[in-house]
Amino acid sequence: MKKLREKWRNALLRPAIYAFSVRFLAALAVILVVNYLVGKNTPRFLGLSFLLLALLFVALAWIAYLRMDGVTLPKPLMTRVNLRKKPKRQYGDMIDYIDEKPGPTFEELEDQEKDLCLLLADAACCVIYLVLSFFF
């Protein structure tokens, strides 16, 4: 736990929140689509689905923690896939631009900081889906 506190900076909050929101909403969309396609609108099905997602996020958080600890995956599995392409358009000047930069993006972070953001995002998703599984 001390290792996590040493690596934490306030600038990592924004990438962690972005990673959390993307992961939470994508998993929720998958569960709702599966619930719609299967046709079981029972609370038990949703509860089990949320519990399954919580276990998945525990596994993802554990993998991120192991990466922070120095465990590496084989080379073909270590490649990070960047699905977003940078737009090729030019940006004009903004008159009301504030001089402060809002903070680093996820791509600008070091590998240890990326793993910390993913660990926090996965742990938060796990907690929320675990609580949701108790209500359904």
Image (cartoon, helix red, strand yellow):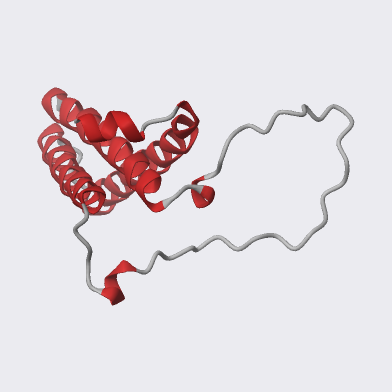
| 88 displayed left or right of 43 | right
Whole-percent x, y for residue 39 in the image = 22, 48
Q: Quadrant of the N terminus?
A: top left
Q: Quadrant of the C terminus?
A: top left
Residue appearing at x 41%, y 36% in the figure? 16
User: Which quadrant of the figure has residue 130?
Assistant: top left
| 29 displayed left or right of 48 | right
Count how many numbered circles sit on residues in the image. Answer: 0
Residue appearing at x 18%, y 51% in the figure? 66
Whole-percent x, y for residue 34 in the image = 26, 51
| 67 displayed left or right of 42 | right
Q: Residue furthest bottom?
A: 76
Whole-percent x, y for residue 61 in the image = 22, 44
Residue appearing at x 18%, y 38% in the figure? 50
Say which of 62 and 126 sits in front. 62
Residue appearing at x 13%, y 43% in the figure? 55
Whole-percent x, y for residue 116 in the image = 33, 41
User: Which quadrant of the figure has residue 122?
Assistant: top left
| 47 displayed left or right of 111 | left
Q: Is 43 drawn above or below residue 60 in the view shown? A: above
Say which of 35 and 134 sits in front. 134
